[in-house]
Amino acid sequence: MFLMFAIIALAVHADDADDVAQETVEEEAEAEDEYEDYEDEDDGGGNDHPLTDMPSQSDEITVRYQFIGNDEQESDFPLGEVIHVLVGVINTSPEDYNVTFAMGSVNHPVDLAFYIQNFTQMHFNTTLQPNTEYTFQYDFFPNPQNLDVDSKYQLALSLFYENELEFFADTFFNETVNFYEKSSDADLQTVFLFAVLAGFAGIGLYVVSNACKKSSGPVEAGTSDGMITADEVGSVKTANSARASNDKAGGLRRAKGKKNSTAKKKAKKLRKALQSEKAAKRAAKLAAEKEE
């Protein structure tokens, strides 16, 4: 019965795992469509890319940031999930600034000119008036197809803005980070399933062990006859000595057949008497036990 429950549970878990895997593939495909990465800078158009030959930042603009929903440290980010970061911009100048867009990339930790993955360019086109502050939200998607959980990368996030004279860029986050695979619900279900199966196995072993103990049953002690008295011992010795004397007589036993037959009859009567006496004693003992 326990084996049948285990097989049913495994079958249901397999179906759930297939559904979760299918949903994961669909979610990744949607995320890739929504957050399409830029191509690497090997097509000859590197000078046109916003992350190459970046302008300097303005001393009149202050940029701050805060990641949303990242329970880990800022150096650890999950793969295959959209990451949100809030970017606060403060304009301390007497003129207007236009915040145009934000963008990010994953670079090689040693050679920053080597781009491993570029993130979506998110446009804001928001005018920031003098002595005002505005908060933007930038979302990016680390694609697990070209990132390794066992390697370190350089993550750079930049905000681009301009005034009437020139363009500026502020790389507000530029640190070495790690990427990890977040545990899915399927893993938790697997752990729970094995825990349930282990519990069923323990219950089964307990039931079987108790059944074996009950089937063996207690050992009953046997009953013994009463003690043989001295008179009984003497009667048996007399009968044995008479039998031995008859065996020694040999031919005389044949000549005196009448005496021998008489001795046998006496011994036979003696044995019967002994048996009757034992039977009487046993009957009296049983009667006494019943009365008690």
Image (cartoon, rainbow, N blue to C red):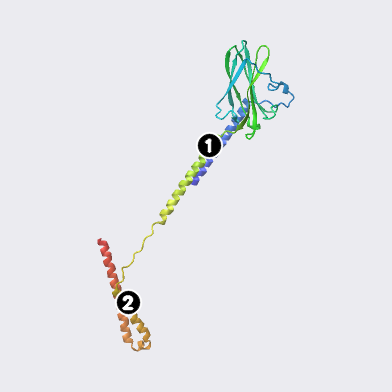
**Relative to residue 59, is residue 84 depicted above or below?**
below
Q: Nearer the viewer, residue 87 or 111?
A: 111
Mark 2, Cα crowd under 10 Å, few <14 / some 14-19 / many 20+, is some
Mark 1, Cα crowd under 10 Å, few <14 / some 14-19 / many 20+, is few
Q: What residue occupies the far front of the structure in this picture? A: 59
Q: Nearer the viewer, residue 238 or 267?
A: 238
Give how far across and how far down residue 291 sits, in percent: 24, 61
What's under tag 1, amino acid-wise?
Leu
The answer to whether any part of residue 1 appears in the image is: no
**Relative to residue 126, is residue 241 depicted above or below?**
below
| Badge 2 element | helix
Choose the circle earlier in sequence order: 1 or 2: 1
Question: Taking 71 as reference, is 115 left or right?
Answer: right
Q: Nearer the viewer, residue 153 or 276?
A: 153
Quarter occupied by the C terminus: bottom left
Residue 188's disc number: 1
Residue 46's disc number: none
Q: What residue occupies the far right of the structure in this picture? A: 44
Residue position for label 2: 236
What's under tag 2, amino acid-wise?
Val
**Relative to residue 256, is residue 79 depicted above or below?**
above
Give how far across and how far down residue 193 sits, in percent: 51, 40
